[in-house]
Image (tube, grey):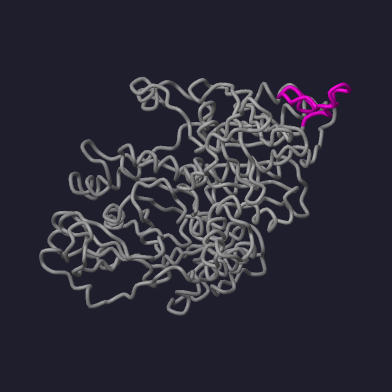
Amino acid sequence: MRDFHSFGIDTCRRTAGRIKTTCPQCRETRRNKRDKSLSVNLDNGKFLCHHCGWKGYAPDETELRERRQKDEYRQRMHQLPSHFHRPVFDPTHLSLSEKTGHYLVLVRCLSESAIRYLQITEQEEFMPQSGEKENCICFNYFENGELVNTKFRSGQKHFKMVKDAELIPYNIDGILNTSECIVTEGELDAASFITIGRKDTVSVPSGANSNLAWLDRFIPTHFEDKKTVYIAVDEDSAGLKLREELVRRLGAERCRIVHFGPGCKDGNEHLVKYGADSLGICLAQAEEIPLEGVFTADDVSKELRALYENGMAGGAETGWPNFDKYCTLELQRLMIVSGRPGDGKSEWVDELVIRLCLRHEWKIAYFSPENMPIIYHHRKLIEKLTGLGFNPHIGMTEEFYEQSVRFLTDNVCHILPGDEDYSIDTILSKARGLVVRRGIRILVIDPLNRIDQRLPQGQTELQYLSSLLNSLSRFATHYHCLVILVAHPRKMNRNPVTGITPCVEMYDIFGSSDFYNKADFGIVVERDDKKGMVRIHIDKVKFKHLGSPGEATFVYNVINGRYSPCEESTGDNPGPANTQFDNKNWIN
């Protein structure tokens, strides 16, 4: 039921349909106090008085509960982490000098009401670019009315933010509980839309940076309820990358792309050149994301031109030179990893994804029931991160431990459905949520045989596996992720003469040749105990610009779980070519 009672509305004991009743706002002032001027839609909660114009919306119990939960979540998330510094707001700086006021109002065309609303201030501040104090415009970042950060902008276009303060969206309070919002690339652009009356506008805090880690905690409280999100970022190459990531995180189905007039790359330039009414028209004409699954050459014209002019570029490197020689990685791809039981498939995948996270900021989600409890898995990851054993000693200091935990908190999460089934649909549903809320780029499913197989009636196991691989490929493509599936081979029998179990090939994976056919990358992990090394067989690289089949050899460190590149010698023992691990991209 909807809470009309809190508004003082008498619903005449009706619970559905449309009714007319007296208006609690104007009833006492009217001559005919029994006139039923208030129209109420009991189904959707909207009401309107045709006499005084009072209107509103009554939420139902589910919405009230979700709103309470959201408020509780906001309160929990609003607690300042210990490593963040929070500045103190000084209202005496609200009085702007004539020069600054002239710049904002006459040059940048911002309204005085927008300047007051955003509490833009002015002060002298030391700027590292010039090495001296400069007069700065101060864009103050508030949350729940409290100052969280400030961006200082000098007349020489030098910028800085408060040291060790949290990054949050500019004007984040302006989009709380609104049905729409506008996202811009800069504070002046946000102020431009606020000038035309759209207070539901935020700006990203760090410009055209596609790393949106700061967005994570605001997704459930400020963005999940949005029906429409207008993306109004700069229309240059960096802005296009930011737009792509915002659309990926916020959902293409509700995003609209704002384009600016000729000669204008952002909202403020359009406001200055064409005026407030014209900027409002840009918003009204914002285009929807093109229909999914239908493309023409014109839809990808910019990407096609870039490919024509620059050629095919290699993928992301891991920092293992012997592996990168044969294989570089790319998002929107499916990697399948196999190998004999006990040869270290999971250990190698763990180091692979940690490397990709550190070098390229690709956040990770695991579905890995065999790595339970989660703290055991975190222990292994911290050892790989630090190169140190997981216990208090000279190297693993308390500070180093806290830094490692913070890194894992920011970049790694685990999917464990709990009482729900472990079907591929459930796993991918959780992963979709992590793309939105956490910005994951890598999904690891380890291993395949821990996924619940629920074959529809009449479907064979081969058909099921083919459908599952298709689902993983579609997820990788649609959500711009690298999906890594660890799959066990069929039973491999030892050679009765030599006693050696043959090396696994991709076609040996239990169930279907589709594992080779549908993989973009096919990897086999082989541990050679006799020579004390691990061979990584790159059996398949689908696209030649990313690499070609080959073999990389490693020495495994049992203390910290790291893999060091090496070369095989002519004798029985490995001859390390580079056993000194390169730590420059790791925590230490």
Front position in the image: 100 or 411: 411
Residue 396 image point, x, y percent: 57, 62
Front position in the image: 521 or 438: 521
- 84 above or below 346? below
In the drawing, does residue 339 fall left or right of residue 6?
right
- 367 above or below 466? below
Front position in the image: 515 or 541: 541
Front position in the image: 165 or 569: 569
- 223 above or below 423? below
Residue 8 image point, x, y percent: 55, 75
Q: Quadrant of the N terminus?
A: bottom right
One can see residue 459 in this view: no
One can see residue 23 in this view: yes
In the drawing, does residue 117 fall left or right of residue 529?
left
In the drawing, does residue 35 fall left or right of residue 568?
left
Say which quarter of the image contains residue 165.
bottom left
Q: Residue furthest right?
A: 496
Q: Residue furthest left?
A: 99
The answer to if 490 sits in the magenta stretch is yes
Q: Main secondary structure of the magenta part?
A: loop
Say which quarter of the image contains residue 191.
bottom left
- Kindly identify the residue that appears in the image at 25 percent across and 65 percent down: 138
Q: Which residues are magenta?
A: 489-512
Say which quarter of the image contains residue 87.
bottom left
The answer to if 146 sits in the magenta stretch is no
Residue 313 image point, x, y percent: 42, 26
- Kindly identify the residue that appears in the image at 47 percent across and 43 percent down: 359
Q: How many marks?
A: 0
Residue 236 image point, x, y percent: 30, 38
Q: Residue furthest bottom?
A: 28
